[in-house]
Image: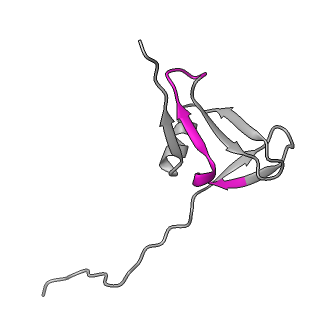
């Protein structure tokens, strides 16, 4: 007799990814969805950053993004802009 593994009608649902963030202006701490964040990847550490708008005070926040942060944000579905320079 042959064993068969069949999964009919099984729907996998994933919870939305949330990222913990903080506002340097009002010092609020909160969670943001991937759609609330933007990631810019530049040629150097100074030009690689993520940004968001604070849901508490409305400030625009920009923070540096190292390799690990870039990996987490891209893996979590954050929209990414790749910056480049012209020679």
Residue 37 versus residue 64: which sits nearer the camera?
37
Residue 39 image offset from top left, x and y in percent: 56, 39
In the image, the segment drawn in magenta is 31-46
Q: Tell me the residue at 79%/50% (across/down).
A: 29
Q: Nearer the viewer, residue 58 or 69?
A: 58
Quadrant hosting residue 4: bottom left
* Residue 83 image position (x, y, % from top left): 49, 28
- The image quadrant of residue 3 is bottom left
Q: Which residue is outermost to the left?
A: 1
Q: Indicate how the structure is coloured in the image.
A: one colour
Q: Residue furthest bottom?
A: 1
Which residue ends up furthest to the right in the rendered image?
Answer: 26
Q: Is residue 38 above or below residue 2?
A: above
Answer above or below: position of 42 versus 37. above
- In the image, residue 41 lies in the stretch drawn in magenta: yes
Image-based side of 24 in relation to 33, left or right: right
Residue at 79 percent across and 42 percent down: it is 59
For residue 60, what is the image quadrant? top right
Q: Is 85 on the left-hand or right-hand side of 69?
A: left
Q: Is residue 43 magenta?
A: yes
In this rendering, the answer to whether 42 lies above or below 31 is above
Q: From the top left corner, tell me how far across and down residue 1 is, in percent.
A: 12, 88
Which residue is found at the position 52% from the left and 51% from the top? Answer: 76
Which residue, as the protein is rendered here, is positioned at the far top?
87
Q: Is residue 43 left or right of residue 23?
A: left
In the foreground, 12 or 35: 35
């Amino acid at each position: 007799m042959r064993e068969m593994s069949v999964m009919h009608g099984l729907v996998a649902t994933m919870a939305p990814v949330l990222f913990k963030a903080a506002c340097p202006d009002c010092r609020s701490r909160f969670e943001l969805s991937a759609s609330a964040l933007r990631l810019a990847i530049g040629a150097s550490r100074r030009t690689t950053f993520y940004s968001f708008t604070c849901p508490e005070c409305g400030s625009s926040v920009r923070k540096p993004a190292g390799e690990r942060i870039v990996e987490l944000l891209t893996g979590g579905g954050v929209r990414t802009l790749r910056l480049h320079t012209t020679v």
